Image (cartoon, rainbow, N blue to C red):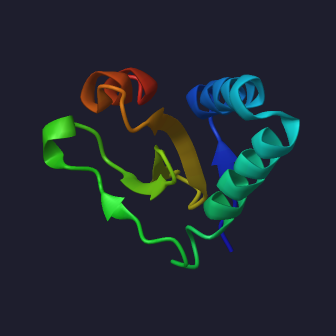
């Protein structure tokens, strides 16, 4: 059974999402959003969350799914685990941020 590993860029984004939600909606909503996000990560392997391949135009290998107002980008790691690479808000310029977070 594969595990999911939150990589550095994704960890940074989770912190940003928590702080933003905390400031906008309060601690309870921030916790609910982050818990839901981690629940979604856990459902990737079982396909309870529908993921799609990242379009070739992005120039990176991996998959993505939508969680509320964010896109979660992930890939299989060499050991078979799932690496959560980054999480981008729907309003962000996806291609450039994605290349940065994938290390390209």
Above or below, comparing residue 36 to residue 51 in the picture: above
Q: Is residue 84 left or right of residue 88?
A: right
Please tell me in which quadrant of the rendered image residue 100 appears. Answer: top left
Residue at 44%, 26% (x, y): give it: 101
Q: Measuring 61% from the left and 58% from the top, which residue is drawn there?
A: 81
Write the residue at 28% across / 39% down. 60
- Determine the residue located farthest toward the left in the rendered image: 57
- In the rendered image, residue 54, in percent from the top left (x then y), is placed at 28, 50
Task: Report the quarter where the N terminus lies.
Answer: bottom right
46 left or right of 55 in image: right
Is residue 104 visible in this depiction of the protein? no
56 or 77, which lies in front? 56
- Position of 104 with respect to 41 (left or right) is left
Q: Using the image as rendered, state which of residue 62 and residue 20 is in the foreground.
A: 20
Please determine whether, in this image, residue 14 is positioned above or below residue 76: above
Residue found farthest to the front: 25
Q: Is residue 9 visible?
A: yes
> How many numbered circles are shown?
0
x, y (%) of residue 63? 38, 55
> Looking at the picture, how far across and down is residue 94, in whole percent?
31, 31
Which residue is more in the foreground, 14 or 10? 14
Q: Residue at x 69, y 27 (%)?
A: 24
Above or below for 29 versus 65: above
Where is the C terminus found, in terms of image quarters?
Answer: top left
């Amino acid at each position: 059974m594969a595990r999911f590993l939150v990589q550095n860029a994704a960890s940074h984004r989770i912190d940003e999402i928590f702080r933003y939600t905390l400031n906008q909606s309060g601690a309870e909503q921030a916790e609910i959003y982050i818990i839901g996000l981690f629940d979604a990560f856990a459902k990737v392997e079982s396909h309870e969350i529908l993921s799609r391949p990242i379009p070739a135009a992005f120039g990176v290998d991996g998959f993505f799914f939508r969680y509320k107002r964010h896109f979660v980008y992930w890939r299989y790691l060499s050991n078979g685990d799932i690496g959560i690479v980054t999480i981008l808000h729907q309003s962000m310029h996806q291609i450039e941020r994605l290349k940065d977070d994938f290390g390209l």
